Image (cartoon, grey):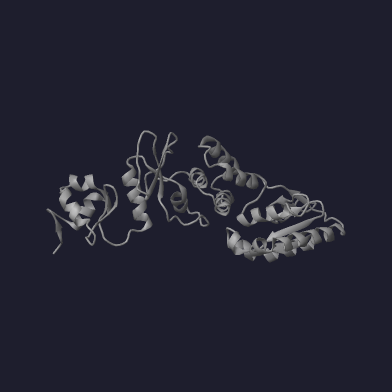
Amino acid sequence: MPRRVCSLTLDEIAFRCDSTVVHVRVLEDIGVPRRTIHERCRPGGPWQSLLPGVVLLQNAPPGRADRRRAALVYAGPDAVLTGLDALQLSGLRRAPTPTGPVHVLIPADRRRLGGGAVLAERTERLPATAPDPWPAAPVARAALDFCRRSRDRDHVRTVLAEVVQTGRASPGELAAELREGSGRGSALARQVLTEIAAGVRSSAEAKARTVVGRTGLAEPLWNARLVDPAGKHIATPDAWFDDVGLAWEIDSREFHFAAEDYERTVVRHSRMTAHGILVVHTLPQTLRKQGAEVVAELRRCHAQAALRPRPDVRAIPSTP
């Protein structure tokens, strides 16, 4: 027989609330007394309180979706998910998994605390969103809302690089969003956007750019398209030392956003060598652990390439 709470069954309550995460006021409006709500949310009870005034109609550990819903219910009408939760919902694969407070944007005239479970940011620039399935900020806004609060350079690089590489926002759109938003905490994001404007498209490439700065060599072109005299595409190496015709590839599945990129590495290498290009391959973990050795290798390979006739190829810089 269905279990009843006041005059309603649990199924009837869930149906009327249209969610298992609900505000106390909604429960009261359908006839559940506040005392009953309080009793059922006691430790070991069948319900649980997720945030002030927000109840989960089950006692299983809440998942991230429950916490997102609770944050939106708590924050009130027009609240918008941003930061890592919005990025995860958008389909970004390399962004850190959200585990901390749910970051939401709320109207500037509203005050919410959140008790550590919600980061409620008041803003005059509340983005318009479609309500279903989740009200989430546009990717550029969500990415920079995360980056302003992150002190992890690798995380910021990874997020912004994936946003650009997957076509969700251009470097120009990210720069515009950065200008329009708060300047607080924006220094790191600005530095990374400078890297991206130079053609860097991954965290590994950003590390590689730092290593190049220690070689004394001229700055290479990042992700430049190489074409033959007829304009036919040859390859797009991670870095290209145009003065001597030296290509540098950072080889790892981990730092390529499409799995098939890794399988194409051998094909790219063969095509470049067929055009007389010297190709250097480096693993990301080597960049991290053996930076001095990589510097020495790049210098040696650059000197070796300088002894050969420069390949008859043209480099087309990456478009920001």
Identify whether 112 is placed above or below 279: above
Q: Is residue 233 visible?
A: no
Report the quarter where the C terminus lies: top right
Residue 120's place in the image compared with 154, above or below, is above
| Residue 97 in the image, given as x and y percentages of width and height | 46, 57
In the picture, measured across the screen, residue 57 lies left or right of residue 173, that is: left
The residue shown at (84%, 55%) is: 310
Find residue 272 and report its horizontal and vertical position in percent: 76, 60
Q: Tell me the quarter of the picture where residue 279 sits.
A: bottom right
Is residue 53 visible in the rendered structure shown here? yes
Left or right of 212, for residue 204:
left
Number of marks in picture: 0
The x, y position of residue 80, in whole percent, is 40, 43
Location of residue 208 by image quarter: bottom right
Give the residue furthest to the left: 7
Of the pair 3 and 195, the residue shown nearer to us: 195
Of the 4 image quadrants, the one containing the N terminus is bottom left
Picture residue at 49% right of the left edge, 44% below the top: 145
Residue 15 percent coordinates (x, y): 23, 53
